[in-house]
Image (spheres, rainbow, N blue to C red):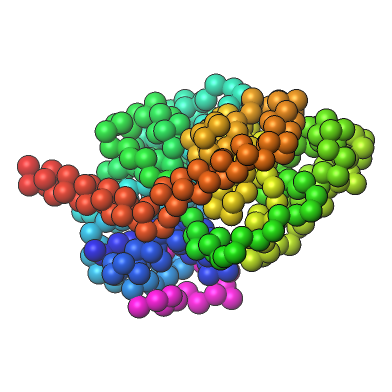
């Protein structure tokens, strides 16, 4: 199959775990030809990169919502069987539809519909308020009405170019049932929305024998220091945990330090700064070691479009506690593959963490079932086959419609 995948920053070899890159590599390894297109945001990288015999990466310069490089590629690349766009807020998506819509079936993976600041009141806590679909300009009528109402022209056109492609795809691959329901409420036919999760490279977690867990009871948090990830909920839960387990240790792995000062101040005020180890520069190999040595991954998120750390933790044999909200509660099944806690509730988070730290048998059972679940669900070959089946379904539907 000839496949074009279009992302924002998804095909950077320095970040091999990005889901669209994993998918592209897996499809190429299975014998399909993949042309991967992304922004040319780092000019130290080549504009055209032959990553493997069947995977070529093309990087496009952008000027606003237009790219001469994409125009050129559209005429030069072999005709694909399908085009797969990643991310809703994408500078190249509207132009890609101008090139290929009606000629080639096109599908979208939004990668977290509630990351869209036009659809939600607060991107960091999107579930706390009703959605605002009226602020999405998805057709020319809403575009012109907004301009006539005196809305800022540049912001209005940007809104339109981002959102107009949404309802024009032949299919959408939602990462969760929650995401599917939201996309359907925006007007996309439910029967054309498939649930296809991201794939995770799991082979790095299979090195025997299992690494010995840390001597001290150890929690690990992996994520940005932003409210959406719930780092403050974890910090607020720590006094209760520390009062029960005095030698508790918490490793926080983050590349985003925007709220680091706030974290340290909050932890110091609560008397728990001494149990926290903050790591801001962690490569993939070190992350694997940290997951394999920790007893418990804590993901107290207020929203996740998908949620990779809980899957990586289960693969590493590390038990998981996460929030009972989208999309963590679709990755983790309570009392089966992990524990779910009440939304935005430090007391319940502390209680569930203590349950797992003090019940080794339950923790071992969750770990065993979690490993089985992630390998059956998120393995790259499994997800690639699901994706290929969906591709073929949309190609067949497109061909039938063309005949009619």
Q: Nearer the viewer, residue 296 or 146?
A: 296
Q: Position of residue 44 (x, y in %)?
A: 59, 76
Q: Nearer the viewer, residue 7 or 158?
A: 7
Q: Nearer the viewer, residue 210 or 145?
A: 210
Q: Give the magenta part as a residue range.
A: 37-53
Q: Position of residue 119 (x, y in %)?
A: 52, 31
Q: Nearer the viewer, residue 348 or 49?
A: 348
Look at 56% across and 60% down and name the residue there.
Answer: 205
Look at 75% across and 54% down and name the residue there.
Answer: 214
Instruction: Pick the quarter of the image with the N terminus.
Output: bottom left
Whether 185 is drawn above or below 78: the answer is above
Task: Name the image quarter holding residue 188.
Answer: top left
User: Is residue 49 in sight in this rendering?
Assistant: yes
Look at 31% across and 31% down and name the residue there.
Answer: 190
Q: Position of residue 238 (x, y in %)?
A: 81, 35
**Residue lying furthest top:** 130
Left or right, 164 with reference to 271: left
Q: Position of residue 187 (x, y in %)?
A: 35, 29
């Amino acid at each position: 199959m000839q496949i074009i995948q279009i992302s924002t920053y998804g095909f950077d070899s320095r970040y091999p775990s990005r889901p669209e890159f994993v998918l592209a590599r897996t499809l190429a390894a299975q014998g399909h030809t993949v042309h991967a297109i992304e922004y040319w945001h780092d000019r130290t990288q080549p504009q055209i990169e032959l990553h493997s015999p069947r995977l070529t990466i093309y990087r496009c310069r952008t000027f606003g919502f237009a790219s001469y490089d994409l125009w050129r590629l559209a005429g030069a690349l072999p005709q694909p069987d399908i085009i797969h766009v990643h991310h809703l807020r994408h500078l190249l998506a509207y132009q890609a539809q101008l090139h290929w819509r009606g000629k080639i079936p096109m599908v979208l993976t939004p990668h977290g519909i509630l990351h869209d600041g036009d659809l939600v009141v607060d991107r960091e806590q999107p579930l706390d308020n009703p959605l605002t679909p009226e602020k999405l300009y998805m057709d020319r009528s809403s575009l012109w009405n907004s301009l006539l109402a005196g809305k800022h022209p540049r912001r209005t056109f940007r809104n339109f170019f981002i959102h107009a492609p949404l309802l024009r795809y032949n299919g959408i691959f939602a990462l969760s049932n929650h995401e599917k329901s939201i996309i359907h409420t925006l007007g996309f036919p439910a029967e054309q929305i498939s649930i296809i999760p991201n794939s995770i490279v799991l082979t790095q977690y299979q090195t025997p024998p299992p690494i010995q867990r840390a001597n001290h009871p150890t929690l690990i948090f992996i994520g940005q220091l932003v409210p959406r990830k719930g780092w403050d909920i974890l910090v607020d839960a720590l006094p209760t945990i520390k009062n029960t387990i005095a030698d508790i240790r918490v490793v926080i792995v983050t590349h985003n330090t925007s709220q680091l000062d706030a974290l340290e101040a909050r932890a110091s005020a609560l008397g728990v700064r001494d149990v926290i180890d903050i790591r801001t520069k962690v490569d993939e190999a070190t992350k694997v070691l940290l997951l394999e040595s920790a007893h418990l991954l804590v993901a107290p998120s207020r929203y996740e479009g998908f949620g990779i750390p809980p899957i990586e933790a289960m693969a590493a044999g590390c038990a998981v506690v996460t929030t009972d909200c989208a999309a963590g509660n679709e990755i983790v099944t309570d009392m089966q593959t992990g524990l779910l806690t009440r939304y935005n509730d430090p007391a319940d988070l502390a209680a569930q963490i203590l349950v797992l730290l003090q019940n080794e048998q339950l923790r071992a059972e969750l770990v065993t079932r979690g490993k089985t679940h992630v390998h059956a669900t998120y393995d790259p070959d499994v997800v690639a086959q699901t994706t290929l089946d969906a591709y073929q379904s949309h190609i067949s539907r497109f061909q039938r419609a063309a005949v009619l």
